[in-house]
Image (cartoon, rainbow, N blue to C red):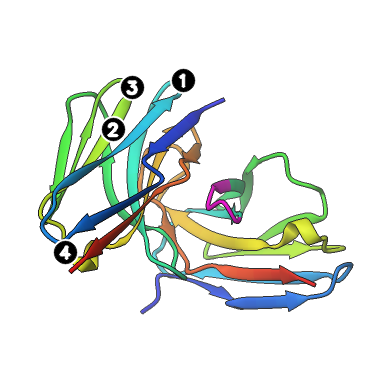
Amino acid sequence: EDQVTQSPEALRLQEGESSSLNCSYTVSGLRGLFWYRQDPGKGPEFLFTLYSAGEEKEKERLKATLTKKESFLHITAPKPEDSATYLCAVQNDYKLSFGAGTTVTVRA
Amino acid sequence: DTAVSQTPKYLVTQMGNDKSIKCEQNLGHDTMYWYKQDSKKFLKIMFSYNNKELIINETVPNRFSPKSPDKAHLNLHINSLELGDSAVYFCASSQGPRDPQPQHFGDGTRLSIL
């Protein structure tokens, strides 16, 4: 069965303090790895899709990278509005399997 | 315009009751999904429909029955509700079932069983 493990569970950052979130996975036949952002009381919001090892995607202060066993979400100079839970998911054929997420809190 | 909308947003009910959750998407997508997010925040797929055809049916009690009247709507009916059914249920949609297209989620239905 596909497995997705995210670390750390929670991350508290000072505004401007860059950091990285990890997503390690085991999947037979990766078709895509997704990053989502989830705010309290809301559904997950799509951020990135990565398809193959070595690929990188960027959006504002976020950058996602992919290797054969893990993905990183780098947050550069975060702001309070970056506070959220970040979810990683892998797709094998028809199904998405999610990790439990990393809850990021950015203090001003 | 809300892309994926679910109703109701909150559902509080007694054990043993039957309830339904409705989902509609206006994105023109062919595939829709139901997920359950438990207290530990894990999102787990329950069902998926592609053009009204069931394509994913995970190990879910048969008290849960999805119905897709057309490709823009996917409803979830739950019979004989149990305490363990308390969770947030999310509906999602994507362009297709197999290509790694992003899924778009509704804001969830918070189900609490008393």
Amino acid on which disc 2 is placed = Ser
Label 2 to label 4: alpha-carbon separation: 22 Å
Marks 2 & 1 on one chain: yes
Q: Are marks 3 and 2 in contact (CB under 8 Å)?
A: no
Q: Nearer the viewer, mark 4 or mark 3?
A: 4
Q: Marks 3/2: CA distance? A: 7 Å
Badge 4 is on which residue? Answer: A79
CA distance for labels 1 and 4: 37 Å
| Picture disc at residue A71 | 2
Pointer 3 residue? A69
Determine the CA span between mark 1 and mark 3: 11 Å
The span from disc 4 to disc 3 (Cα, nearest Å) is 29 Å
Q: Position of residue B46 (x, y in %)?
A: 63, 48
**Image quarter of the C terminus of chain A:** bottom left
Instruction: Inspect this view and state whether residue B57 appears.
Output: yes
Label 2 crowd (10 A; few <14 / some 14-19 / many >=20): many
User: Would you say the residues marked 4 and 3 are in contact, meaning their CB atoms lie under 8 Å apart?
Assistant: no
The answer to whether A5 appears left or right of B111 in the picture is left
Which residue bears the numbered disc 1? A28
- Host chain of mark 2: A
